[in-house]
Amino acid sequence: PMFLLAIGVSIWSGRRKGVRSKLLVGALGQIAACLILLTLSGSSPLWSLLLVAVVFGVPQGLNNLALQNSVYFQADPE
């Protein structure tokens, strides 16, 4: 589920300009996913693990594309 959501988020956010907002939302998504991850234990149900995977998919899709865009915009056109 994480990679499917990341692909969808990349397609959706790739059509929009700007890098900063993508990086900020991606960072907040990573923090949220890490906080959810801290609540897991050995007896956590399967749906909670799937929730973590889905929440991690959003920042993965946003951050990967935003970082590639920022490198592209900052690189010399040589």
Image (cartoon, helix red, strand yellow):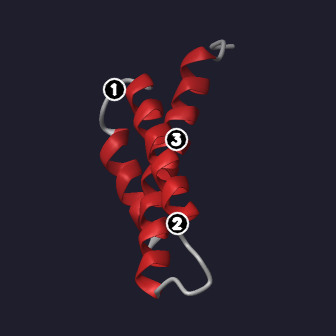
Distance from label 3 to label 1 (Cα)? Answer: 14 Å
Q: Earlier in the sequence, mark 3 or mark 1?
A: 1
Q: In the depicted view, which residue is nearer to us: 50 or 58?
A: 50
In this picture, is 14 found above or below 48?
A: above
Residue placed under numbered mark 3 in the picture:
63
Q: Select label 3 or label 1 by which is in front.
A: 3
In this picture, is 71 found above or below 10?
A: above
Image position, residue 31 (x, y; %): 51, 45
Which secondary structure lies at badge 3? Answer: helix
Residue placed under numbered mark 1 in the picture:
17
Residue type at mark 3 is Asn
Which secondary structure lies at badge 2? Answer: loop
Residue type at mark 1 is Lys
Q: In the depicted view, which residue is nearer to us: 48 or 43?
A: 43
Residue at the (56%, 87%) spot, across then down: 43
Residue placed under numbered mark 2 in the picture:
39
**The N terminus lies in which quarter of the figure?**
bottom left
Image position, residue 25 (x, y; %): 40, 37
Which secondary structure lies at badge 1? Answer: loop
Q: Earlier in the sequence, mark 3 or mark 2?
A: 2
Distance from label 3 to label 2 (Cα)? Answer: 24 Å
Image position, residue 9 (x, y; %): 37, 52
**The C terminus lies in which quarter of the figure?**
top right
Mark 3 vs 1: CB contact within 8 A: no
Q: In the depicted view, which residue is nearer to us: 38 or 71?
A: 38
